[in-house]
Amino acid sequence: MAGLKFRVLLDSDSKNEAFRDILISDTDNFESFYKAIMSSFRFKGDQMASFYVSNDAWDKGHEISLMDMSYDDDSIDSPSAVMKEAIIKDFLEEPDQKFILVYDFLRMWIFMIELIGYEKENPVAPEVLMAVGMAPPEDSRIVAENDELITDEFDGDEDDDDDDDDDDFSEDYGIDEDFSGYDQYDY
């Protein structure tokens, strides 16, 4: 048994970086890790969340959800991983394993997590070894109200090929649009 030292970086719009180094037992589950992360950033932890196994490019892989979200036959194809049942060491594929934690799917708080070390001593409970920076308030991100669409950097000024002439396809590929001699039942 060993202690795992993770660096947890909050991806934020703020110029100030906020991260925590958390030591947790390799036999602990992801729910315990989730609660330690929420507590260390002073978030309530009352919203939906999922961990994703990641790689060096920070791609989202296998999902480990807070609650079982499988529906009917979905669980046949790929077994669902639920935080309280998923043991951390079972998901360690690399010595510097990375995970992504998405918290509050409306506000989209994203935590980038990287395994940065091992400790011989196994901690009894998760502990914060180092805290750098202040996390923004949990409710500081805006959520759409009354079915308003929140837009990102795309404001509609880009070239939009959808407004072009519909004849582009036929011109590009030499298709004759005269179907007068076509009999739909004559194959």
Image (cartoon, rainbow, N blue to C red):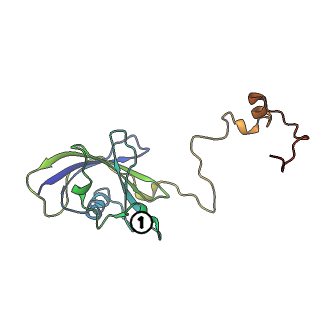
Residue toward you, 43 or 168: 168
Residue toward you, 170 or 24: 170
> In the figure, 116 relative to 73: above or below?
above
Q: Quadrant of residue 66?
A: bottom left
Extreme left residue here? 120
Q: Give the side of residue 175 with respect to residue 12, left or right.
A: right
The amino acid type found where label 1 is placed reads: Ser
Q: Residues within 10 Å of mark 1 (few under 14, many from 20)?
A: few
Measured from the top left, where is residue 71 in percent x and y? 47, 69
User: Which residue is painted at 37% across and 42% down in the image?
Assistant: 58
Measured from the top left, where is residue 3 in percent x and y? 14, 54
Count of picture labels = 1
Q: Give the side of residue 164 with respect to residue 144, left or right.
A: right
Measured from the top left, where is residue 30 in percent x and y? 28, 61
Query: Does dot 1 land on a helix, a strand or a loop?
Result: helix
Q: Which residue is mark 1?
A: 75
Q: Quadrant of residue 1?
A: bottom left
User: Which residue is painted at 62% across and 54% down in the image?
Assistant: 149
